[in-house]
Image: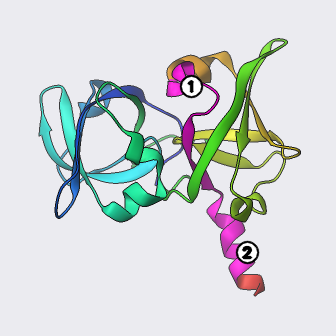
C-alpha cells in the first residue's frame, strides 16, 4: 500500500527484457535508506519487489503481464521515474490509498499553465471513466492527484511543489502515463452486481 506522495525521482539505469522476468535497475538515493530485498516499492506507480540492491541503485523484476498493462514498455535508460516506498504502521497517511496495481495507460493531451495553476489533461480509456469523479482521486504514474473535472477530458490541477517534486516536470503532451483508479469504486461496483 502506498499514499501517492512521491518520495524521490529516480533514473532508469537499465531495463533488460528476459526470461523468466525483465530486470529493471533504478538509480536512487533517498529511498535506499532502509530498502531491503523483498520490499515493495512503487516505480511510476507500479508496485514492484526489490530483488537486488547496491550502493546508489536497486533492481526489480517485472513480469510480461506488468509490461503489457503499463507504460514500462517505453522504459529506456536515463528515463526519470517516480519512487515511493511502501507504507509502514508508523507512516503518515497523506495522499490517498494507492495499491500500485495499474488499471490501464492514459495519454497526456495537454500540460501547461492556466493562470496561476498548471493543468494536466488526460485521455483515459473508456473502461476507466466510470470510476473517475470530480473531487475524487486518480493516481498518475504513482502521483495521487485530485480530479478537477471529468468532461470533456480528465483535468487535474497541479500545485508547483508536486510539479517540481515528481516526473511531471519532464512531462509533455503525448506521453503515456500509468493510471490507477480508486479501488473503493471498483469494490462498490462489484457489490452492486
Q: Position of residue 23 (x, y in %)?
A: 21, 48
Q: Quadrant of residue 28?
A: top left
Name the residue beneath numbered marker 2: 188
Colouring convention used in this rendered image of the protein: rainbow
**Mark 1–mark 2 CB contact (< 8 Å):** no
In the image, taking residue 174 as reference, residue 86 lies left or right, namely left
Q: Find the magenta span and give its range.
A: 166-190
Give the residue displayed 88% in from the left and 46% down from the top.
151
In the image, taking residue 12 as reference, residue 182 lies left or right, namely right
Give the residue displayed 57% in from the left and 34% down from the top.
175
Q: Position of residue 43 (x, y in %)?
A: 39, 42
Q: Secondary structure at mark 1?
A: loop
Q: Nearer the viewer, mark 1 or mark 2?
A: 1
Name the residue beneath numbered marker 1: 171
Between the residue at mark 1 and the residue at mark 2, the CA separation in whole angstroms equals: 33 Å
Q: Quadrant of residue 33?
A: top left
* Residue 91 visible in the picture: yes
Amino acid at each position: 500500500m502506498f499514499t501517492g506522495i512521491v518520495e524521490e525521482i529516480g533514473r532508469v539505469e537499465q531495463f533488460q527484457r528476459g526470461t523468466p522476468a525483465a530486470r529493471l535497475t533504478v538509480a536512487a538515493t533517498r529511498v535506499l535508506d532502509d530498502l531491503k530485498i523483498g520490499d515493495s516499492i512503487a516505480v511510476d506507480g507500479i508496485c514492484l519487489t526489490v530483488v537486488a540492491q547496491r550502493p546508489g541503485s536497486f533492481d526489480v523484476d517485472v513480469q510480461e503481464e506488468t509490461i503489457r498493462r503499463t507504460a514500462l514498455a517505453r522504459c529506456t535508460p536515463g528515463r526519470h521515474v517516480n519512487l515511493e516506498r511502501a507504507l509502514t504502521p508508523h507512516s503518515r497517511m497523506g495522499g490517498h490509498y494507492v495499491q500500485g496495481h495499474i488499471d490501464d495507460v492514459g495519454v497526456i493531451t495537454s500540460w501547461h499553465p492556466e493562470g496561476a495553476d498548471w493543468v494536466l489533461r488526460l485521455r483515459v480509456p473508456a473502461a476507466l471513466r466510470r470510476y473517475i469523479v470530480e473531487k475524487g482521486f486518480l493516481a498518475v504514474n504513482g502521483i495521487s492527484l485530485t480530479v478537477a473535472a471529468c468532461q470533456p477530458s480528465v483535468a487535474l490541477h497541479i500545485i508547483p511543489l508536486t510539479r517540481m517534486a515528481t516526473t511531471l516536470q519532464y512531462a509533455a503532451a503525448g506521453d503515456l502515463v500509468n493510471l490507477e483508479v480508486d479501488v473503493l469504486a471498483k469494490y462498490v461496483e462489484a457489490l452492486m452486481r
